[in-house]
Image (cartoon, helix red, strand yellow):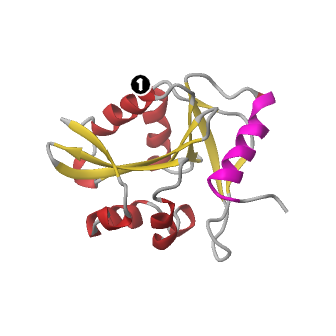
């Protein structure tokens, strides 16, 4: 059985969680640990631990932005990948959501990035056509060229800028200069 358990207080996050977070996402693609823990309790943000057969195997963070849900980070422990856990989690998220689901993926420049895009395409996510960069998480970090993917439909060109701006404003608290 797979369970999503919302984190309600920073003290619930253990060293395993932090290890997966820091090993899975390079520094430019993640918040500093204290900044992540400060988000717990934010009305728009939900950080979920993932358990499979009562064992901690990963996490997923989701922002409820009213008109859509945004998956910021999703990671399954290396030893648990390829067992269908990720597929079942994303299907749960889709089933629970009453709005479209949007996420960022790296450009398909590596085999890992290509496999990640293929994973989401198998779950009926659509790659958008707009130009998108993940804003820097801090002054000393760089922005990262990414793609937006969406479910159940492709982001329409006339909606792309509004969606991008909403993600940048709420998730990253970033405004173009």
x 53%, y 54%: residue: 42
Instruction: Name the magenta segment's main secondary structure.
Output: helix
Residue 37 position by quadrant: bottom left
**The C terminus: image quadrant:** bottom right
* Magenta residues, start to end: 158-173
- Figure check: 176 above or below 108: below
Question: In this image, 116 relative to 104: left or right?
Answer: left
Position of residue 103 measured from the top left corner of the image (x, y, whole percent): 55, 41
The foreground one among 75 and 92 is 92
Q: Residue furthest right?
A: 177
Is residue 166 a member of the stretch shown in magenta?
yes
Q: Is disc 1 surrounded by few (<14), some (14 to 19) or many (20+) residues within 10 Å?
A: few
Q: Is residue 82 visible?
A: no
Judge whether 150 appears above or below 31 on screen.
above
**Residue linked to disc 1:** 95
User: What is the count of numbered marks?
Assistant: 1
Residue found at x 77% / y 38% = 162
- Residue 64: where, in percent of width, then height? 55, 41
Q: Residue at x 49, y 47 (%)?
A: 113
Where is residue 48? Give x, y as percent.
37, 48
Instruction: Using residue 75 as the reference point, say whether residue 142 is left or right of it.
Output: right
Question: At which x and y percent is residue 145?
Answer: 66, 54
102 horizontally vs 78: left or right? right
Q: Is residue 116 visible?
A: yes
Is residue 12 magenta-colored? no
Front-most of residues 37 and 159: 37
What is the quadrant of the N terminus in the image? top left
Q: Quadrant of residue 22?
A: bottom left
- Relative placement, left or right, of 127 versus 114 is right
In the rendered image, the residue lying farthest to the bottom is 140
Helix, strand or loop at mark 1: helix
């Amino acid at each position: 059985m797979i369970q999503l358990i919302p984190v309600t207080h920073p003290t619930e996050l253990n060293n395993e969680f932090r290890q997966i977070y820091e090993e899975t996402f390079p520094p430019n693609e993640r918040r500093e640990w204290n900044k992540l823990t400060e988000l717990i309790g934010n009305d728009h943000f939900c950080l979920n631990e993932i358990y499979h057969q009562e064992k901690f195997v990963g996490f997923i963070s989701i922002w409820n932005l009213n008109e859509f849900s945004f998956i910021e980070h999703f990671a399954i422990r290396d030893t648990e990948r390829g067992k269908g856990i990720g597929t079942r989690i994303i299907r749960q998220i889709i089933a629970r959501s009453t709005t479209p689901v949007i996420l960022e993926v790296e450009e398909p420049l590596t085999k890992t990035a290509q496999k990640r895009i293929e994973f989401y395409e198998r779950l009926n996510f659509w790659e958008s056509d707009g130009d998108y960069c993940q804003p820097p998480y801090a002054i000393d970090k760089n922005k990262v060229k990414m793609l937006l993917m969406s479910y159940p439909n492709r982001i329409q060109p006339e909606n792309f800028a509004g969606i991008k701006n909403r993600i940048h404003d709420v998730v990253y608290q970033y405004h173009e200069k």
